[in-house]
Image: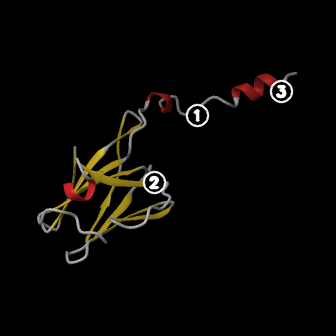
Amino acid sequence: MLLIPWLLLGCEPEDPTTGDCSYEPTYHMMLSATEGVVPEGTVISVAYGGGCEEYTVGGPSTAHQQLFCEGVGASTIEAGRIGCDVWVSGPAVVKVVPPGHVPVLRAVAPLWEDGCIVTQEVVVVLGEDELTVGD
């Protein structure tokens, strides 16, 4: 009988701020190209503490746990942009390898505010060889 109250206390969250955080991705990446469309075959990968995941533009659909990408706009490939949400709790390395363009490789770190992760925008423009992280 004395065990039941102890078990109930064991179910309390250790961090009281956890319940106050909104469920948002760590990074939102927008991939576009100066030449109009992101070419098929472009590989977007994210390496993080728990592993690595890849998305290939125009490739087969695969199961993901941390990296979720899709076309953005009225029609996916025609719109020329790809949006990706990255759901990790620590630093990551974003790599974009487009056929016919210079690969982009950058390290990003999460932004924390009041014990919660704040989504950062990551913009990649193929042909400019730039990757910026900002608000």
Rendered-image quadrant of the C terminus: top left
Q: Are marks 2 and 1 in contact (CB under 8 Å)?
A: no
Quadrant for residue 77, please give it: bottom left
| Distance in Å between CA atoms under marks 3 and 1 | 20 Å
Q: Are marks 2 and 3 in contact (CB under 8 Å)?
A: no
Q: Which mark is residue 3?
A: 3
Which residue is more in the foreground, 129 or 80? Answer: 80
Mark 2 and mark 1 lie on one chain; the one further toward the N terminus is: 1
Q: Residue at x 21, y 58 (%)?
A: 78
Q: Secondary structure at mark 3?
A: helix
- Mark 1 lies on residue: 14
Q: Residues within 10 Å of mark 1 (few under 14, many from 20)?
A: few
Amino acid marked by disc 1: Glu
| Distance in Å between CA atoms under marks 2 and 3 | 38 Å
Is residue 111 rendered to the left or right of residue 67? Answer: left
Q: Secondary structure at mark 1?
A: loop
Q: Position of residue 22 (x, y in %)?
A: 41, 33
Q: Which mark is residue 66?
A: 2
Q: Residue at x 46, y 65 (%)?
A: 52
Mark 3 and mark 1 lie on one chain; the one further toward the N terminus is: 3
Amino acid marked by disc 2: Gln
Q: Residues within 10 Å of mark 3 (few under 14, many from 20)?
A: few
